[in-house]
Image (cartoon, rainbow, N blue to C red):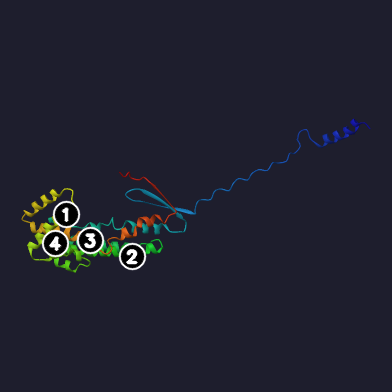
Amino acid sequence: MTRFAAFFPALLLAAACSSPDQPAEQPTPPTASAPPAAAPDTARQRFSWEDDACRYHGYFRAGQYTQQQLHDSYQLVTFPYATAAYQESIWELEQLAPDSINTRLQRLETQHRQERAALQALQVVPLPYWQRLKKLRQQEEAEMYQLRKLTLQAYFQPELLRQAPRAGRCQRYVQALASADTLQLLQAWRELVEAQKKNNGAPEHLEAKYQQQFASAEHLRYARLELMLFGWWNCANEQRQYVAVADEQQPWVAFEKLFGKVTRFDCEDVD
């Protein structure tokens, strides 16, 4: 049998097994499976706040704190700068009247109750630092309230100043204000003006103001007003036990440390 004869049956067999209309089946190449859909980022959460300089986003692990805890902890950072109670002061002779004092005392009492309740209700981050800061802020608020109340009452009961705690360095003002000796009152006023002039950029204006007030028929009331506001109050406020809570504790620094990442934006330009 020739080589052609052997090849011919094999060719016929191959033709019979394949259809002219259906090509031979080809193997399917492997395909890469689609990546799974990205799960939402629930492992990290964001808390936002702002101050006078910037706005902030702080990022922290889910479950590490609650939004309420962060919000309440930030209240301890800003306390008591936005509290209206601490703006109660007597600045003008017209305000130096019993009705005006009583109105301020009533407002102060209301603000104190609200502030005390608000501080007590804060649910701060459950860390020792924030628990301690909450206690310090409560003590600071109570101390400020007592000093403000005493000061308002002392406009018409100056002998109450003798009962003020931690006011040993303010005795010059206490003695002058609580004394019936008007010469002592006027001398303390003159000394206060001289001390103010040393730390003022326009001492001539302070002197002119003093001379105008001293020449007034109301000079004794001016003396009491100035000594209470710029003498007694400034001195007693500096002697408070909790006056340096913010500087010592630096809560704004501690607050940022609660977050793994903090971004700042919309910041004010500082010259």
Q: Quadrant of the N terminus?
A: top right
Q: Are marks 2 and 3 in contact (CB under 8 Å)?
A: no
Give the residue pinned by disc 3. 237
**Residue at 88 percent of width and 34 percent of height:** 9
**Residue at 8 percent of width and 56 percent of height:** 219
Q: In the figure, is residue 201 to the left or right of 211?
A: right
Q: CA distance from mark 2 to mark 4?
A: 35 Å
Q: Are marks 3 and 4 in contact (CB under 8 Å)?
A: no
On screen, residue 264 above or below 191: above
Give the residue pinned by disc 2. 135
Q: Where in the figure is residue 140, as x and y percent of width and height?
A: 28, 63
Q: Earlier in the sequence, mark 2 or mark 3?
A: 2
Q: Earlier in the sequence, mark 3 or mark 1?
A: 1
Q: Residues within 10 Å of mark 3 (few under 14, many from 20)?
A: some
Judged by depth in the image, the label closer to the viewer, 2 or 4, is 2
Judged by depth in the image, the label closer to the viewer, 1 or 4, is 1
Q: Are marks 1 and 4 in contact (CB under 8 Å)?
A: no
Q: Earlier in the sequence, mark 1 or mark 2?
A: 2
**Residue at 17 percent of width and 68 percent of height:** 162
Which amino acid lies under the numbered mark 4 shown in the image of this protein? Pro
Judged by depth in the image, the label closer to the viewer, 3 or 4, is 3
Which amino acid lies under the numbered mark 2 shown in the image of this protein? Lys
Q: Residue furthest front?
A: 198
On screen, residue 134 above or below 26: below
Q: Residue furthest bottom?
A: 163
Residue 196 bears which disc, if any? 1
Residue 98 bears which disc, if any? 4
**Residue at 32 percent of width and 60 percent of height:** 248
Q: Earlier in the sequence, mark 3 or mark 4?
A: 4
- Front residue of 108/226: it is 226
Q: Quadrant of the C terminus?
A: top left
